[in-house]
Image (spheres, coloured by chain):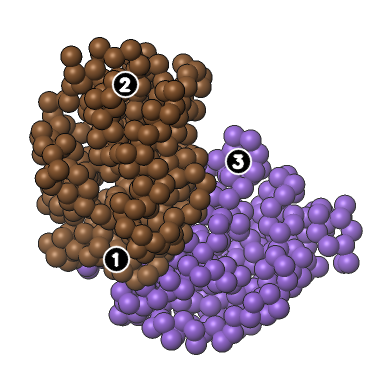
Amino acid sequence: MHYLTDDEVRALEKRANEIRTSIIEMLVEAGSGHTAGPLDMADIFTLLYFEVLRHKPQDPYWKDRDRLILSNGHICPVLYATMAHAGYFPVEELLTLRKFGTRLQGHPHREALPGVETSSGPLGSGLSQAVGMALAERMENPYSSKYFYCIMGDGELNEGQIWEATMHAGKEKLHNLIAIIDRNDIQIDGYTKDVMPLEPLREKFEAFNWDVQEVDGHNIRSVNDALGKAQAVYGQPSLIIAHTIPSKGVDVFERDFRWHGNPPGLGPEDRVKKEDQAKTALMKLRTLNGQITTHDYF
Amino acid sequence: MAYTLASHINPNVFETSVEKVPNRNGYGEGLKEAGTRDERVVALSADLTASTKTNMFADAFPKRFVQVGIAEQSMASVASGMAAMGKIPFIASYAMFSPGRNWEQVRTTIAYNGANVKIVGAHAGVSVGPDGATHQAIEDIALMRVIPRMVVVAPCDVHEARKATLALAKYVGPAYMRLAREGTGVVTTAGTSFEIGKADIFLKRDVGHRTRVGIIATGVITYEALCAAKTLNEKGIGASLLHMATIKPLDKEAIDRYAEDHDMIVTVEEHQRAGGLGGAIAEYLSVHKPMRILRLGVDDQFGQSGTPDELLRHYGIDSNSIVREVVRYVG
């Protein structure tokens, strides 16, 4: 990794905004799917695919690639959109999301789309798979510089399997494993603090012998710095708790848990009527009214 | 005229002195052998390393052994991740926990991903004995058989378990192998051939008898079914025994031929009558050659504590019960 210049940060932010626009277009075309998580993870996915990951979009099975394991498969619109913008497949194909015969299954399928490292959707199993990959890599080559990035939702931490894998990764001291939690404080039924409180979250992972950092998940420079530190951790797996704002980028959808599982057109109507939701979201993103830039902060 | 025992069957199989060995021992030996042949083979355990006989591999290849703790769900997915990196993982636990508890992880992260993981369910069936119903997996064949792509194998003895382990290490794709706890009669020999997907006639009926009963069995209960077939022939009923070590994919050719040569089919398994071997045979024959099929197994009940012999008798799948049921069925 390297330190990002202001111009590079701005370019990534612009790219993240384009990816958000694609996400809205995909969801509207599909007529179903999740909105809040994909929008709030757009900055991190952009940073990973355009800056951090060692990968070759034209050669998705390249042996020496880093692996990105998406555990909370329901946020796949952001995975697909980022992959398309990064060159894995044509951006036009994004509009096939969730349609019969598509490679962009409603939840990701490893065999459907080259570059998708695992099938996911049933929550809680991604971290175990990342642990398995990281372990296998270490068996094969103890000096490997490959990294295994596992993206998880915060709601999915309710799953017991996550803690089985967390304990296991700590035991194995897997410093080639970097997990990122999308800490957006929502899940389908409500706010995480109401459904099943997670705090103190940082301390939980520290108690399992992980190195933990917390960042603003929309501050691309901060996340990049945190990933750099995570890569340098030795003898422990790393966790980055990325604090995000659900539906980030479309201010009228932001912070409302009811946008977790609905596409524009089927979301809550308090702020925007259903028929105007898609139009409003695209207008917000295209005019930056959703205020997604972060470079003013520094 | 008499029944014919296939030449590759242990000649002492009907002696009271027949050697009784747990077929999980064959897994332990086979896994170690597979590990020697192919360094991609790795073994995972969820705190049941000795009783699943994974310890033989773990002692020989400590760096290729992963102890996940009592966490069968994570074990399935860790194995999936290792397979994605080119390893050939064998995960072993008791069948009740793996693939019992971790069924969804097996389905999504192993089978749907096309991960080359072998799931080994030890201590299957009621013959686990004193541990009782919580530890007696009698639903596992059904659970695995319904998952697309999953190969399902239940070896009859220690030799076959060893050979099945070696065959599964070579086979590319998800597979389930069912093993038992108890020492059971050694039916085959070290030289008997084994191939995934091939059923094998162990005993051919006495062609002098008018009644033609085709028994089909899987797993260690094949020993009981074999003894039952012998007794039936001696009682004047022409009974054969087809051993189906592979329940999926079904050896359709063997079943076709067998069904032609018999007037009725009897399936025997240490499993619920629903959804297991009998279910698979009935599904196939109902379309291709509708005929009478008697399915022996546990009849929609849970197991309980007891000795293996007591339990097999109670649930009607020891050799005496099989004989009794067949005689009644033949009428």
Within the image, what quadrant is residue A93 found in?
A: top right
Query: On screen, B2 above or below A228?
Result: above
Q: Quadrant of the N terminus of chain B?
A: top left
Same chain for labels 3 and 2? Say yes or no. no
Q: Which residue is mark 2?
A: B237
Label 1 element class: loop
Give the side of residue B217 with respect to residue A151, left or right.
left
Residue B192 seen by the camera: no
Pointer 1 or 2: first along the chain: 1
Q: Position of residue B204 (x, y in %)?
A: 24, 21
Q: Quadrant of the C terminus of chain B?
A: top left
Label 3 is found on which chain of the structure?
Answer: A
Chain A's colour is purple
Of tags 1 and 3, which is closer to the observer? Answer: 1
Residue B130 seen by the camera: yes
Chain B's colour is brown
Q: Which residue is mark 3?
A: A93
Within the image, what quadrant is residue B100 found in?
A: bottom left
Label 1 is found on which chain of the structure?
Answer: B
Give the side of residue B311 with respect to residue A245, left or right.
left
Q: Position of residue B218 (x, y in %)?
A: 32, 37
Q: Position of residue B128 (x, y in %)?
A: 33, 57
Of tags 3 and 2, which is closer to the observer? Answer: 2
Q: CA distance from mark 1 to mark 3?
A: 48 Å
Amino acid marked by disc 1: Leu
